[in-house]
Image (cartoon, helix red, strand yellow):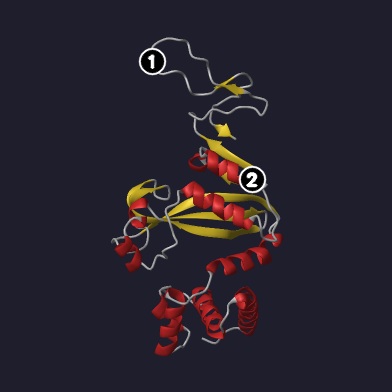
Amino acid sequence: MQEDPATEASAARAREHLIAFVEEMVAGMAHVRQRTNALLYVRGLIEHGGRKSLQPTIWRLGEDAARYESVQQFLADSPWDAALLVRACAERVTPELDVTAWVIDDTGIPKDGSHSPGVKRQYSGTPGKIGSCQITVSLHAVGGRGTVPLGFSLYLPEEWCADPPRRHKAKIPDEVSFQTKPQLAAALAERAAGWEIPTAPVLADAAYGDNTAFRTGLQEADLEYLVAVSPEIGVFGPETGFSTPKSTGRPGRPPSRPQALAGRADSRPGAA
């Protein structure tokens, strides 16, 4: 069946816009082949239906085996910094969104086997249960006109970080060390705070809000935040003073935990 001319023209314009956008995003890549492969990969993900694994995607675009090998090497081994592309996209798109919040969360990616980086049996909020998966921590800018990612970090459990042969086989760089999910999230937010994008209050659930170092990091990066805290967390007003109780002279270990003098706020679940 012959395509409608108006539909063909619309598709051609959309393809032109896509190509122009991707070329702008990958301009910071050092090599022409990297930029070409990035554009081809994005076209394959967006322009055509069917399976999104690499080989059928390349075949649908009419490319040959040599180009498949080139794109595979680009994705698996080519030395380019993904953060450059994330930043370029964020600085281009975020100002268009009427941003109201930066949202931190983590996502479980179901994964069988034991060789993919970070995979293990662990709790994931995505299915709401323990299962074999990878977990990625993410930061998104969210606004009235959409959302854009500001960063992703793969969570590597301690047993992965402490296993050099397994790390080497999975191509995990030597400089990568164990970090908790709140540490990964804080690093993403602090990095994005240095970009030329609109900032907004950081939102996160209690898995992050309970972590004092996480909240402190946001404050030191001059980022406002609104985070949930669990019922066990005590919340104190800025006017609250603390002191360590004096020894009573009784047998046993002397008191060492500081106590609030006044101004203790409500510690029920809420925002800190």
Local SS, label 1: loop
Q: Could you tell which of marks 2 and 1 lies nearer the N-terminus? A: 2
**How packed is label 2: few (under 14 Cα within 10 Å), some, or many (20 or more)?**
few
Left or right relative to 67: residue 30:
right
The residue lying toward the viewer, choosing from 260 and 94, is 260
Q: Which mark is residue 220?
A: 2
Distance from the alpha carbon under mark 2 to that under mark 1: 40 Å
Q: Position of residue 266 (x, y in %)?
A: 58, 24
Check the picture and name the quadrant holding the C terminus: top right
Q: Residue furthest left?
A: 113
Q: Does the rendering let one see residue 104?
A: yes
> Along the horizontal axis of the image, is 65 left or right of 220?
left
Secondary structure type for disc 2: helix
Task: Identify residue for label 1.
Answer: 252
Residue beneath the point at 37% across and 62% down: 117
Please give the name of the residue rendered at 51% of the width and 59% of the height, measured from the top-left corner.
152
x, y percentage for residue 227?
Answer: 57, 40
Give residue 187's position: percent from left, percent from top.
55, 53
- Residue shown at 55%/50% (left/top)? 186
From the viewer's side, name the closer residue of 57 and 188: 188
- Camera-nearest label, 2 or 1: 1
Q: Nearer the viewer, residue 236 or 47?
A: 236
**How many residues crowd mark 1 within 10 Å: few (<14), some (14–19), many (20+)?**
few
